[in-house]
Amino acid sequence: MKAKGHPLQAVRAWKRWVACLAVPLGLAVAGIAADIPGSSDPPGMQRYAGSELIGYRAPKFDEFLLPLGPPSGFSPLAYEKSLKTEGLLSRYAYVAPTGRSTAELLRNYKSEFKRLDLVTLYEKAAGEKGWFGPTLDQIANEDQLGQILAYNESQERVLVAKSKLTNPTYYYLFVTAYADGVIPEHLQNVITKGRVLAELVVISPQQMQENMAFVSAEEMYRSLSSSGKVALYGIYFDTNQDKLRPDSEPLLKEIAKLLSANSQLSIRVVGHTDNQGKPDYNLDLSWR
């Protein structure tokens, strides 16, 4: 019997990162006036100093095919090696300061990934087999990036990594340089030929909010008898609290009915917190 609490509380963690940390090679937190209103950097990750956030999609539950090798097809999208992921998916498009190169930007992000203690799963340097684009058209609606921005294929770089957690967060970085094509009016003074662009996709291991039908005592018993377990999604806690909320009562009554009608039943109750905050704190909260 699995009691689930804190559905989608990880959303509270998607706030703008404000701590200034000095790291090598120029990645630093920098609030940019030209950033899209309501946007933010990925939690805990620092952008390349002086970059502007020109495309943003807030985190929402979705799927993402993570490339672990060069592309093998585009319709449908496929790679020689890949990993299907799902979770809270967010997208970020940055334009780097004038005069920067794709190699420099990639090198900085590799340093940032190292600072975050991420494990590199795949890297594509310039000139290697495969063309990953176009990708920037997937990031947002037309009022942000408009039509597909054409870019220099020879400057394309890709970096894929993950955290070391049991349920990891995945990172997909795509770096290129703008070549030509249609530029949205509000970016015509920002994006020029040769300007370096970066797209970052983050897939956080959060489950979608479970909108499951109410589970009765009879249904619980059938599931326990057939599979030895039952997942319950109607037990709720407020953030950082160990007290059950009143809206948990209907399901708790069904659990009591199940136990009263089946006194011989022996069950093991398993629950968990979300993965925000320090592990020691979350472990203590889980025990409580």
Image (spheres, rainbow, N blue to C red):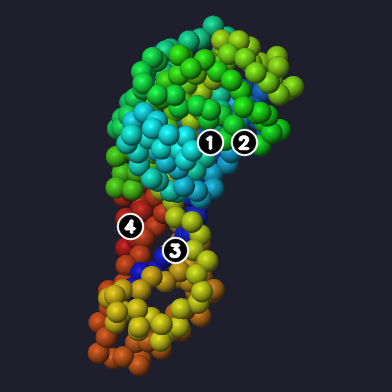
Taking the view exactly as shown, the residue that stands out farthest to the top is 99
Separation of residues labelled 4 and 1 (CA atoms):
33 Å
For the residues carrying marks 4 and 3, which lies nearer the camera in this image? 3
Q: Quadrant of residue 55?
A: top right
The mark nearer the N terminus, 4 or 3, is 3
Q: Which residue is mark 2?
A: 140
Q: Which residue is mark 3?
A: 5
Residue under the image location 50 percent in, 26 percent down: 133
Residue under the image location 35 percent in, 83 percent down: 222
Q: Amino acid at mark 1?
A: Arg
The mark nearer the N terminus, 1 or 2, is 1
Q: Amino acid at mark 4?
A: Asp
Element marked by disc 1: strand
Count neighbours of disc 1 (C-alpha within 10 A) and say few if under 14, some if 14 to 19, many if 20 or more: many
Q: Amino acid at mark 3?
A: Gly
Residue 29 visible somewhere in the drawing: no
Separation of residues labelled 2 and 3 (CA atoms):
31 Å
Separation of residues labelled 3 and 1 (CA atoms):
27 Å
Separation of residues labelled 1 and 2 (CA atoms):
8 Å
For the residues carrying marks 2 and 4, which lies nearer the camera in this image? 2
Element marked by disc 3: loop
Q: Is residue 231 above or below residue 279?
A: below
Are the two marked residues, 1 and 2, in contact with CB atoms closer than 8 angstroms? Answer: yes
Q: Which residue is mark 4?
A: 284
Residue under the image location 47 percent in, 40 percent down: 76
Q: Which residue is mark 1?
A: 91
Count neighbours of disc 4 (C-alpha within 10 A) and say few if under 14, some if 14 to 19, many if 20 or more: few
Residue under the image location 59 percent in, 20 percent down: 150
Expressed as whole percent of the image width and height from the top left, the position of residue 71 reads 40, 30
